Image (spheres, rainbow, N blue to C red):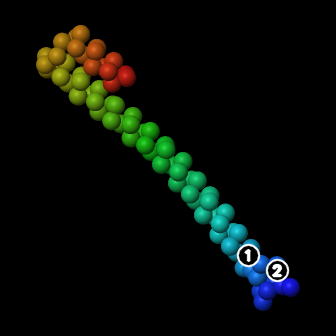
């Protein structure tokens, strides 16, 4: 026996709308997730660039010597 809207589960034409909404939300979620990953990586790169710039300034001012500069640069993974 079929429901009021047709189809075995009572959804009929509304099932197609729900399916479309499901796929649209899934694609939007996937795109958001990828953008989040990319932005977090670029944010990390920005922080490393800023840290290196501060390190260069300290070296230029004479606050640290070449050995310490190289050690700290290595610690930053640069």
Q: Hey, which quadrant is residue 73 in on the image?
A: top left
Classify 10 Å Cα crowding around label 1: few (below 14), some (14-19), many (20 and above).
some
Look at the picture and state if 18 lies above or below 10. Answer: above
Residue 67, x across and y down, in percent: 24, 10
- Horizontal arrangement in the rendering, residue 5 relative to residue 32 (left or right): right
- Horizontal arrangement in the rendering, residue 26 relative to residue 50 (left or right): right
Q: Element at badge 2?
A: loop
Q: Element at badge 1?
A: helix
**In which quadrant will I find the C terminus?**
top left
Name the N-terminal-most of marks 2 and 1: 2
Q: Give the alpha-carbon distance from disc 2 to disc 1, as whole Å.
A: 9 Å
Pointers 2 and 1 in contact (C-beta within 8 Å): yes
- Horizontal arrangement in the rendering, residue 27 relative to residue 69 (left or right): right
What residue is rendered at 52% in x and 54% in y? 32
Classify 10 Å Cα crowding around label 2: few (below 14), some (14-19), many (20 and above).
few
Label at residue 7? 2
- Is residue 13 at all visible to an observer of this figure? no
């Amino acid at each position: 026996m079929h429901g009021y809207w047709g189809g075995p589960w009572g959804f009929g034409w509304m099932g197609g709308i729900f399916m479309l909404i499901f796929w649209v939300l899934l694609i939007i979620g996937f795109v958001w997730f990828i953008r989040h990953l990319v932005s977090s990586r670029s944010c990390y790169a920005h922080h490393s660039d800023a840290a290196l710039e501060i390190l260069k300034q300290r070296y230029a001012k004479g606050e640290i010597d070449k050995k310490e500069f190289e050690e700290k640069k290595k610690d930053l993974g640069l």
